[in-house]
Amino acid sequence: MITNSIKEKLLPLFSRYKSNVLFAYLFGSVVQDNMSPLSDVDLAVFLSRQNEKSYFDIKCSLYADFCRVLKRNDIDVVVLNTTTNIVLLDEIIRGGIVLVDRDIDLREEFEQKILHQAMDFKEQRIVFLGV
């Protein structure tokens, strides 16, 4: 399975980011076994709040390392701390695979918060749009 192959390649890389990446997910078509030649690899990371001012730098560094390790450049890196798209966050949590989990309590708290926000969003959408 391609998911296991990607996971095996990325896990050693995450050890270099121990102080930065608190938890990470693999999500999207790779996880759904729905990859095509046009598919990319989707990764989401939750970064330590200590490094809030350098989220962009860390994201760029992660992207470069992911590309090098996976030998491809069609990789999307989502920083969970700064993403406000509730639909995307819900997709990551519901359909993603946890790759790294250095703070299980924080991850579970984050997931619970996002799932509640997503439910509220869906309910509001039904009320306002009838959809």
Image (cartoon, rainbow, N blue to C red):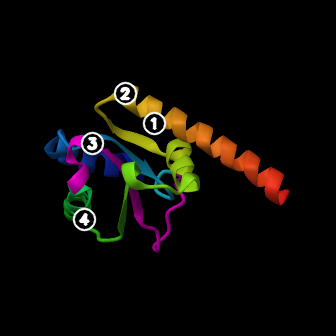
Residue 84: x and y in percent read 49, 55
- The amino acid on which the numbered mark 1 sits, given as a three-letter code, is Phe
- Which badge, 1 or 3, comes first in the chain's sequence? 3
Between disc 1 and disc 2, the foreground one is 1
- Which badge, 4 or 3, comes first in the chain's sequence? 3
Between disc 4 and disc 1, the foreground one is 1
Residue 1 visible at all: no
- Which badge, 2 or 4, comes first in the chain's sequence? 4
Mark number displayed over residue 49: 3
Judging depth in this view, the residue of 15 and 126 nearest the camera is 126
The answer to whether 63 is drawn above or below residue 53 in the figure is below
Residue 64 visible at all: yes
Residue 36: x and y in percent read 50, 69
User: Which span of residues is magenta-colored?
Assistant: 32-53
The residue where tag 4 is placed is 67
- The amino acid on which the numbered mark 2 sits, given as a three-letter code, is Ile
